[in-house]
Amino acid sequence: MADTMGHSAAATTRNTSVVIAFCLLAVAPQIFEFIWSIGTIFGWGVGRGPATVVIGHATALVAGAPGALLGALSGDTKKTSSDVLLALIYSYPLFAVAILTIFMTIRSAQDYVGGIVLMALALFALWASSDLQGMRGFSFGAGTAPRMFGGLLVALGAGIALTGLLTDGPAMAHYAWRGPLFVMISIVFFALAIRPLGVVVTAFASFLISAMGTHETRWVEAIIVGACLTLGCALLFPYVLGLPMPMFPRFLVQ
């Protein structure tokens, strides 16, 4: 009996960490938009401000999405906002999965978590393509393929997650967060800084930020490679591809 209780307690602890991860995944797009909106304060991007983002998503999660569900059940065909659709198509299903996970026995954590992550990607794709035109008769619209592949990926992810519940498999391996974190930071920095700082500064700084993703980086070599890649970008984008991208910081050009 003691062994059984100990095993149950360990399983509950593991499930709790998985549930927290799923809850964070359910609001990841909202968190990303909030981080992105901070750049608008400094003129680094376009879009809604931080306060508007927080109020919009909080209202959609707490009141907008339930109201849209009740309206749909009563036959109301009023168009819903993008924030409400994000909550309905993406966040709510993942919250439901997180709640169900509390009561499940996960036999293969890698399969189960991997399947849910695939489902999350598919649900996000379904939300992103929700405003695209679908099929009309036998005519394909712009949203037909994304929705079709998104639906298939949802089914595939559900099958993989079900395998993690029914068959024994490996537990979650140690995840190296440093590399993906700094790569994502460098991508976000490039997107926010390309207009005010230009290609030269942004490309070089983005490369150095991504180089911080490993402790094995040799900074002399990294600076040399970054300078070469920056030179390549400075020649490729404006001259070879003809893209109207600013080369130098805005305050220097003005």
Image (cartoon, rainbow, N blue to C red):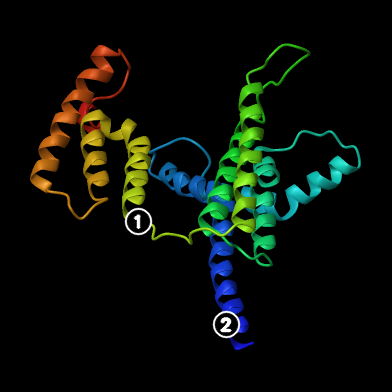
Residue 199 horizontal/vertical position (percent): 25, 29
Mark 2 residue element:
helix
Would you name the residue on which mark 2 appears?
6
Residue furthest bottom in the image: 2
Q: Which mark is residue 56?
A: none
Taking depth in this image into account, of 144 and 187 the one nearest to the observer is 144
* Residue furthest to the front: 168
Q: Could you tell me residue 124's position as x and y percent?
A: 59, 39
The residue lying toward the viewer, choosing from 224 and 196, is 224
Q: Report helix, strand or loop for mark 1.
A: loop
Image quadrant holding the N terminus, namely bottom right
The number of discs equals 2
Q: Quadrant of residue 221?
A: top left
Q: Residue at position x 70%, y 56% from top?
A: 96
Q: Residues within 10 Å of mark 1 (few under 14, many from 20)?
A: few
Q: Position of residue 210 (x, y in %)?
A: 27, 44
The location of residue 209, given as percent across then percent down, is 25, 46
Mark 1–mark 2 Cα distance, whole angstroms, equals 29 Å
Answer with left or right where residue 35 lies relative to residue 187: right
The residue type indicated by label 1 comes to Ala
Closest to the observer: 204 or 54? 204
The residue at the point 21 percent across, 43 percent down is 208
Residue tagged by mark 1? 176
In the displayed structure, would residue 89 be above or below residue 11?
Answer: above
Q: Nearer the viewer, mark 1 or mark 2?
A: 2
Q: Are marks 1 and 2 in contact (CB under 8 Å)?
A: no
Q: Quadrant of residue 178?
A: bottom left
Q: Pick out the residue farthest to the left.
A: 220
Earlier in the chain: of badge 1 and badge 2, it is 2
- Neighbours of disc 2 within 10 Å: few (<14), some (14-19), many (20+): few
Amino acid type at circle 2 is Gly
**Rendered residue at 46%/60% (across/down):** 172
